[in-house]
Image (cartoon, grey):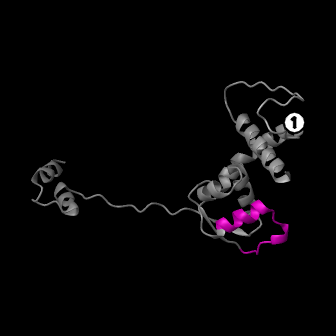
């Protein structure tokens, strides 16, 4: 029950954060003690705290995107050892995925927490020296042939496919 409550609170925080990022639209919030049909339980949360957390996430998100900009980036072991006793379950799970060579995008997909929380926890691990971000490698640049005949030779078409060779020579 406690795990379910924590998960529901995390989902509520993430939904408020996503809603605050919307540029247009409107919403209606009704505070009530009635539970609608089909809803199993309630989430006991302070609405003001929930809104403040959403605002904090909106403020922090640009900084996290600047620190961890690419979903293709990976992480290496940092200079400091992890303090397992100080880590929560989610942080330990994300650290394990990061040290296994997973990219940020893969960690977000497999992390079992929101994308914001993944970036925030990984950023804290990087600041603490436990992880070091590794920028993704640039794509290999393949030079283009300089002439139509070189293109034909590069593709191995030769005279076996005269129509394709003629089109390439006209280029």
Q: Position of residue 165 (x, y in %)?
A: 14, 54
* Above or below for 129 versus 41: below
Residue span colored magenta: 79-98
Q: Residue at x 66, y 52 (%)?
A: 66
Foreground: 42 or 22?
42
Apparent side of residue 112 relative to residue 135 in the rendered image (left or right): right
Apparent side of residue 156 relative to residue 67 in the rendered image (left or right): left
How many marks overall? 1
As helix, strand or loop, the secondary structure at mark 1 comes to: helix
* Above or below for 11 versus 38: below
Query: Quadrant of residue 40 in the image?
Result: top right
- Name the residue tied to disc 1: 47
Query: Quadrant of residue 83 in the image?
Result: bottom right
Q: Residue at x 81, y 26 (%)?
A: 29
Q: Is residue 89 magenta?
A: yes
Q: Residues within 10 Å of mark 1 (few under 14, many from 20)?
A: few
Q: Residue at x 16, y 58 (%)?
A: 149
Main SS class of the magenta portion in the image: helix
Foreground: 11 or 167?
11
Query: Quadrant of residue 41 in the image?
Result: top right
Foreground: 42 or 125?
42
Q: Position of residue 23 (x, y in %)?
A: 67, 30
Q: Position of residue 37 (x, y in %)?
A: 79, 30
Q: Position of residue 117 (x, y in %)?
A: 73, 52
Q: Is residue 119 magenta?
A: no
């Amino acid at each position: 029950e406690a795990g379910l409550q924590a998960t529901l609170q995390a989902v509520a925080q993430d939904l408020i954060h996503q809603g605050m990022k919307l540029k247009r639209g409107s919403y209606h919030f009704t505070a009530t003690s009635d539970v609608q049909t089909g809803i199993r339980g309630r989430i006991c949360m302070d609405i003001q705290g929930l809104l403040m957390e959403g605002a904090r996430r909106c403020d922090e998100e640009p900084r996290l995107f600047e620190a961890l900009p690419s979903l293709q980036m990976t992480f290496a072991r940092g200079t400091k050892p992890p303090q397992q006793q100080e880590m929560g379950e989610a942080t330990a799970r994300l650290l394990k995925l990061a040290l296994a060579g997973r990219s940020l995008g893969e960690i977000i997909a497999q992390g079992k927490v929101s994308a914001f929380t993944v970036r925030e926890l990984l950023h804290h691990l990087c600041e603490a020296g436990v992880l070091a971000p590794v920028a993704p490698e640039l794509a290999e640049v393949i030079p283009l042939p300089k002439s139509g005949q070189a293109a034909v030779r590069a593709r191995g078409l030769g005279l076996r496919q005269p129509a394709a060779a003629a089109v390439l020579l006209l280029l």
